[in-house]
Every structure is written in structure tokens, then in C-alpha cells.
Amino acid sequence: MITDVPGVRVGHWTDPVGLTGCTVVLPPPGTVGSGEVRGGAPGTRETDLLRPGMLVEEVHAVLLTGGSAFGLAAADGVMRFLEERGVGFALGAVRIPIVPAAVLFDLGVGDPAARPGPEAGYAACLAADGGPVAEGNVGAGTGATIAKLHGPERALKGGIGTARVALGGLVVGAIAAVNALGEVLGEGGAVLAGARPVPDGGVGGPAAGPGPGNTTLVAIATNARLTKERARLLSFAAHDGIDGAIRPAHTIWDGDTVFALATGEVDAGQREVEALAAEATARAIRRAVLAADGIEGWPSAREVPA
């Protein structure tokens, strides 16, 4: 789990009726952050600041949220939580919490008027701890769906998952909210969670214009000591993990986003930390779809043979 990285805490807020939610990752003080956005339909906040060369290097929280662009409001609650505790980038007497955020589109599942707001973000922070992280239909994965290339009538339920990979004292953990257009592949490349069979009397083939109702969101954390530039490369490696586990990924209808966090406890080679990042991301994606429970109209991967 991503909380196997010392000092990292995770909290969910879940609306099981409206079928939406948000997930917050709270790293320890001094964590360096970066990230990378790919695909043609992103919804993000504070991602420009994550580029190398920008003023701020430390990240105080990462928010993954449902609700499409409306869900970005949940970051206001995360900022309030941190401000109350004196956490933020110091500018004179003011401390400004740095909270990068990204959204996925879940408004087509459940109640389209149900969206995480500031109180949801605040509640997710209150729930955050360093223990086991709930997976499946919780937090940002509550309304997630996958395998929509052939239309919603053949799609499956997505969710949220987390994994960790270690090499000696180096630990890399990932958490992924999987709401992908594409199908999820197993380690050997076979389909693990794919489109349902064509309904009786139906015609196969891709649906016309699947729409912007997709996106996979990932936060990756490591105890490695990385510069902001190296953390950016770590997010690139996590995108390789997305590409290895989801086909197709990074499409015009996805807003795939990765946040990378480095807590700075151990020295590590870039090759090693990137390899672990790609593997942890792929594992988290697979865990997300296997942990998800089906809802009306959207069965889980466990209910439909691959």
C-alpha cells in the first residue's frame, strides 16, 4: 500500500448514494512533489507548479476526486485542513498549502448532482491515517467505471486500488483511481477486466464517440531522496505503468494524471526507483478493478469472465 512509505497517510470521503467521492494523500513535511498530465480530457489544479523550474518544491497534499471539474472544489477543504494546522508554503505571515488535485468524470453514474465539495475534502483529511487503505468502491473510485470503448452497455465497474514495491530499503507505493476508457490487462498482457460480451442481437465494434467520461488518476510516493526534476521523471515512469496495465491509455477521452511524491529518506538510483514506480502503478490499477463491487448496470470484473 502507498501508506507503506513511512509518513504517508491516506483518507477517503465516500458518497455511496450519489456514487462519488474523493481521496487525499497527506505526505510528511519536506516532501518534494512533481507530476505529469497526459490525455486529451484532464481536469486539474496546481499542476503547473509541479514543473521543474517553478518556485515551490514541497507538496503538502494530493487530492484525487470524482465530480469532474466540480470536484476540484474539494481541494478548498484540504487547504483549510492544512491551514488550520499551520502547514503550507511560507509567505511572510501567511502559509499557503500546496494541494495539487485532479478529477475523474463519474457524473454518468449515480446522481449527477452529487459532487465532492470543500466539506468532502476536509472530511477525507480527518479520515487520513497511515494504516491499511480501503480499496474498490470508495473515495475517488466510488463512481469509477472502465472498458467503455464499446459503449456503457458493455462497460464494467472501476474503483481505487493501492500497491507497493520494495527493493532493499527503497519503497515505492501507488494509489490509483481507475475510470479508464480502456480495458485492464494482467501481468502477462491478457485481458483482466475487459468489455462485456456483445448483448444478444447486438453488433460488436467500438462505440461512436465514447465521450470524455474517463481518466485514471495516480499518486505515487517513495522514500527516495529526489530532486523535483527526478520526481518529474518518476511520474513519467508511473505513466508507463498506466500504459502497461490499461489499453488504450492516454486517449483524447482520458485525462490521465500522475502525481509523484518523494519523502527524502534514502538514496536511490533513478533506474531502480522508476522501475518500481511503473510496477507499483500497474499493480494498483489491477487491484482497483479486482476490488471493485458491481453496481446496477455496471458489473464488477469478478462477475464477468475475462
Image: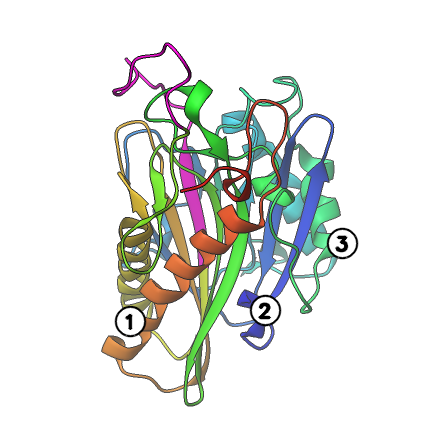
Quadrant holding the C terminus:
top left
> Circle 1 is placed at which residue position?
275
Tell me which numbered mark, 1 or 3, is placed earlier along the sequence.
3
Q: Which of 32 and 42 is in front in this view?
A: 42
Q: Specify which label sits upstream in the sequence, 1 or 2.
A: 2
Q: Residue at x 41, y 65 (%)?
A: 280
Q: How far apart are marks 3 and 2 (CA)?
A: 16 Å
Q: In which quarter of the image is residue 53?
A: bottom left
Residue 99 seen in render: no
The residue carrying mark 2 is: 3
Looking at the rendered structure, the secondary structure element under dot 3 is: helix
The residue shown at (57%, 31%) is 71
Choose mark 1 or mark 3, whichever is in front.
Answer: 1
Q: Where is residue 292 in the image (x, y as percent from the top left)?
A: 58, 44
Residue type for callout 2: Thr
Q: How crowded is mark 3: few (under 14 residues within 10 Å), some or many (20 or more)?
A: some
Above or below 117: residue 34:
below
Q: What residue range appears in magenta?
A: 197-219
Q: In this view, does 229 lie above or below 20?
A: below
Residue at (57%, 74%) from the top-left corner? 4
| Residue drawn at point x = 32 percent, y = 75 percent | 273
Q: Which amino acid does label 1 sit on?
A: Ala
Distance CA(mark 1)–CA(mark 2): 19 Å
Secondary structure under tag 2 reads: helix
